[in-house]
Image (tube, rainbow, N blue to C red):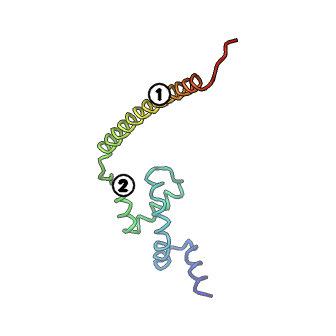
Amino acid sequence: MKKAQVLEEEYFTTSWCFERRVLKVKVLCGIIKDLFPLYLDGVCSNDSKAAIEEHIAVCDSCKADLQTMKKPLPIDVTAQNLSEAQTVKNLSKRWKKGMVKSLLKGVLFTILAIAVLALFLYIFVDVQSF
């Protein structure tokens, strides 16, 4: 048999002899680590949950990684959220002030344009009464 076929057969075997077990643990570490977020959220299937628990029983590296993922992040999100909320409020106030200024400028230029047009018509166009 070729070496790749031997590895494939050892991977898919259900036998738990020591050599094959080590091979299975090394091959599955990446897959198991990919499943950790689902496992921690409690949304993985029962088969996946059993596979993860079985794997971390024999793999100290993955067990340590899982314990690390279970720890809360050392981020004070409350202060960050309040800071971001204040920034959004300030931005909203500036935007509203800008909108009011733009509206007033538009009204002023419209009135000015109408006045200039009326003055032009009054001076240069001879209006005859009917």
Which quarter of the rendered picture does the C terminus lie within?
top right
The residue shown at (37%, 57%) is 69
Three-letter amino acid code at the position of disc 1: Leu
In this image, 122 relative to 32: left or right? right
Question: Sequence-wise, which precedes: disc 1 or disc 2?
Answer: 2
In this image, 107 relative to 69: left or right? right
In this image, 80 relative to 31: left or right? left
Of all residues, the one furthest to the top in this rendering is: 130
- The location of residue 48, given as percent across then percent down, is 52, 58
Front tag of 1 and 2? 1
Looking at the image, is 52 positioned above or below residue 108?
A: below
**Quadrant of the rendered structure where residue 120 is?**
top right
**Quadrant of the rendered structure where residue 128 is?**
top right
**Residue holding disc 2:** 70
Which quarter of the rendered picture does the N terminus lie within?
bottom right
Of all residues, the one furthest to the bottom in this rendering is: 1
What whole-number distance in Å separates the C-alpha atoms at marks 1 and 2?
62 Å
In this image, 130 relative to 63: left or right? right
Label 2 Cα crowd, 10 Å radius (few <14 / some 14-19 / many 20+):
few
The residue shown at (45%, 76%) is 22
Element carrying mark 2: helix
**Residue holding disc 1:** 108
Three-letter amino acid code at the position of disc 2: Lys
